[in-house]
Amino acid sequence: MNRSFRRARHMGVAAAAIILAVATQGRSDQQQGAAPIGDAEAGAAVFAEDCAACHQIGKGATDQVGPQLTGIFDRPAGAIEGFDYSPALQRMGADGLIWRLKTLDAFLANPVAMVSDTAMIFDGIADSPRRQDLLAFLRAHSAQPGDIPESAPTAKAILFELPPETAALVGDPEYGQYLAQECATCHQGDGSAEGIPAITGWPAPDFMAAMHAYKAKLRPHPVMQMMAGRLDDEQIAALAAYYEQIGE
Ligand code: HEC
Ligand code: HEC
């Protein structure tokens, strides 16, 4: 399915949803013995502003434009029965993507880095403290923070962020073409291979973000984790430049 089609389909949907439960019911992270990742109350405001047009959360939350987000921590991607997920998100769920602190953080920073072609039309929250507050709010609506393995005191330090100098690298498309020979055994040039996603014509920054998400093992697919793991930043940038060009 084509990206702009899906975009158009979702843009038209009216923003109509209510946040059901805003308060965090006094369940502070400190009381649970987990490291605080952010301020859940400030996160409620972020949710109201950035998410509530499409998502509900809390007791009695139902699916809207987006699936309900109660208990999102430790939930496999694409797991709500009856919600019409995009093929891209279904694929990630089938690969084994589970929403945890790191994977949610990466998704909310830049949705397409985790799920290219997602039906969630949202640019992401670049501001890290704002994201941390939101994550704290989402976590307050999940299992008890103390029960979540990744809520150990070290959890905060491991969040995924591409250093700006890496994200800004401009690759050499000729070098990329050379490197892409290895990719062509699976990804056909015209992007039409059965069961393997097309990677031509992507904006280079999205392509790089996806490759770094495999490399950091945030995206679950083992073959692609291995492929990306062998590439350095410059090679990833070169491949991104090449594949962007051949899609034109
Ligand atoms: C314009 C509507 C829209 C906005 C705004 C939006 N989302 Fe979504 N969200 C969606 C849709 C649609 C999906 C399903 C995506 C798919 O199938 O690819 C989704 C999926 C998700 C998922 C994956 C759920 C699952 O079951 O796997 C999470 C997590 C999520 N959104 C969180 C958020 C958060 C947090 C915000 C606010 C920062 C937000 N979204 C803003 C529409 C939106
Ligand atoms: C052995 C087969 C194989 C090879 C070789 C391979 N890929 Fe992949 N690639 C896949 C599969 C399968 C997926 C879907 C994985 C998933 O579901 O996350 C994928 C996904 C991707 C994605 C994400 C696409 C999306 O829509 O989410 C990118 C980007 C990508 N590959 C780039 C590359 C590059 C660059 C190379 C060469 C360095 C390469 N791949 C080599 C099989 C391969």
Image (cartoon, rainbow, N blue to C red):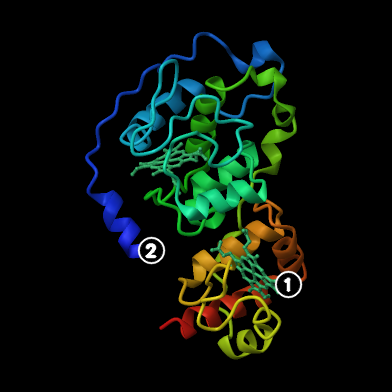
Q: Quarter holding the N terminus?
A: bottom left
Which of the two discs, 2 and 1, sits closer to the camera?
2
Residue at 43% from the left image edge and 38% from the top image edge: 83
Residue 57 is drawn in which quadrant? top left
Q: How far apart, in angstroms, are the residues tagged by discs 2 and 1?
A: 27 Å
Q: Amino acid at mark 1?
A: Leu
Q: Amino acid at mark 2?
A: Arg
**Ligand 1 lies in quarter:** top left
Q: Secondary structure at mark 2?
A: helix
Residue at 36% from the left image edge and 18% from the top image edge: 20
Residue 171, given in percent of the width and then of the height, sits at 58, 80
Examine the rendering and report whether any part of residue 184 can be seen. Answer: yes
Q: Is residue 17 left or right of residue 158?
A: left
Mark number, residue 3: 2
**Whether residue 64 is situated above or below residue 240 in the rendered picture:** above
Identify residue for label 1. 231
- Give the camera-side residue of 48 and 168: 48
Examine the rendering and report whether any part of residue 165 can be seen. Answer: no
Residue 86, given in percent of the width and then of the height, sits at 45, 51
Residue 166, given in percent of the width and then of the height, sits at 61, 66
Q: Is residue 209 left or right of residue 61?
A: right
